[in-house]
Amino acid sequence: MSSELKPPIILLGNSRSGTTVVQKVMSMHPDVVEWYEPNTLWLYADPGRRHDEFDESDATDKVKRYVRGQFLKHQKESGNRVVLEKTPQNMLKIPYVRAIFPEAIWLFIVRDPFSFISSVELKWQRPITGGGIARRLKHTPVTQLHHYAWRYLVQQFDKRVLRRKYMSTWGPRYKGIEQDLKTLDLLTVIARQWSIPSKKAEQDLSLFDKDRVLRLKYEDFVDDPVADIQRICAHCGLEMTDGMAKATREMVKSDRKLKWQRFDPRDLARIIPEISDEMRRHGYEVPAEIAEAIANLPSSERV
């Protein structure tokens, strides 16, 4: 069996943006193995950092050897298949990941902010499960375990002892999120969890050669998922199998795009200034219900 690391496939996308279903379908290819959110692996350079933003200076020789070694180990343990990895926090780490894997194949998925906000607001209410903890810590060096054990204990204490509706933190930690959580309402923070990683990813990906990154929109994907899986396979140098096409038709649902309607449109109208620039960048329009609510806001609060 070859001992060489094959160019991994890095799947970028914010939380709740369809990356999981894409990863599951692609991992059905006989030459691909998934690696689901090994977040602690990417934090190896500085596990105590209070945010998730890393750059190329964090990718020291020691870090490169360790992370690449773990990818090679996962590849070997999985029949020498290509590793397809996805971790939402990597939206904030693109220069760092690129420095470790200059040969990687890149995929990037975006999803409209309102669906993101709806899904993520629910995730803020749910502490990680025991199985999730075990999965995340499996590839964590023993010397770094204490950094993560404390976070998980805080989550459990917040929910099970203090009975708080929301955990103290969840998801991508952009620079300044801790201060924002002290001074802003949670919906505004979640809006920034969409817009800040999106903006940073676009800035970082603009430095790539155009053909290095395959971009997809979640909304287009659910409308014609088989065609997009075909595009992904071609970008990765693979041929889509009949089983992948069948699984795509069965797994991808198009009825999840309007779940944001459980919110009061006035609450979503209020956070439009946080997301409007990135919405325009990705070609998203403000839904009619929210536009109407914006029209009824005081002029000082409109975009």
Image (spheres, helix red, strand yellow):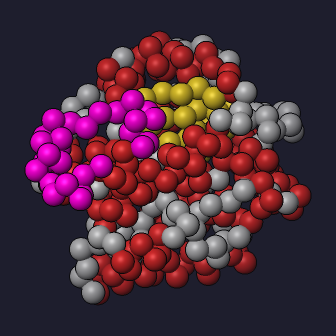
Q: Is residue 54 left or right of residue 66?
A: left
* Magenta stretch holds residue 287: yes
Q: Is residue 112 left or right of residue 134?
A: left
Main secondary structure of the magenta stretch:
helix
The quadrant in which residue 12 appears is: top right
Kindly identify the residue that appears in the image at 29 percent across and 87 percent down. Answer: 161
Q: Is the residue 130 above or below the residue 239 in the image?
A: below
Count of numbered badges drawn on the protein: 0
Region in magenta:
277-303
Kindly identify the residue that appears in the image at 55 percent across and 22 percent down. Answer: 232
Residue 240 visible in the displayed image? yes
Q: Position of residue 1 (x, y in %)?
A: 84, 33
Q: Is the residue 56 above or below the residue 125 in the image?
A: above
Kindly identify the residue that appears in the image at 72 percent across and 56 percent down. Answer: 55
* Magenta stretch holds residue 140: no
Q: Position of residue 173 (x, y in %)?
A: 51, 64
- Front in this rendered view, residue 83 or 222: 222
Kindly identify the residue that appears in the image at 65 percent across and 43 percent down. Answer: 204
The quadrant in which residue 235 appears is: top right
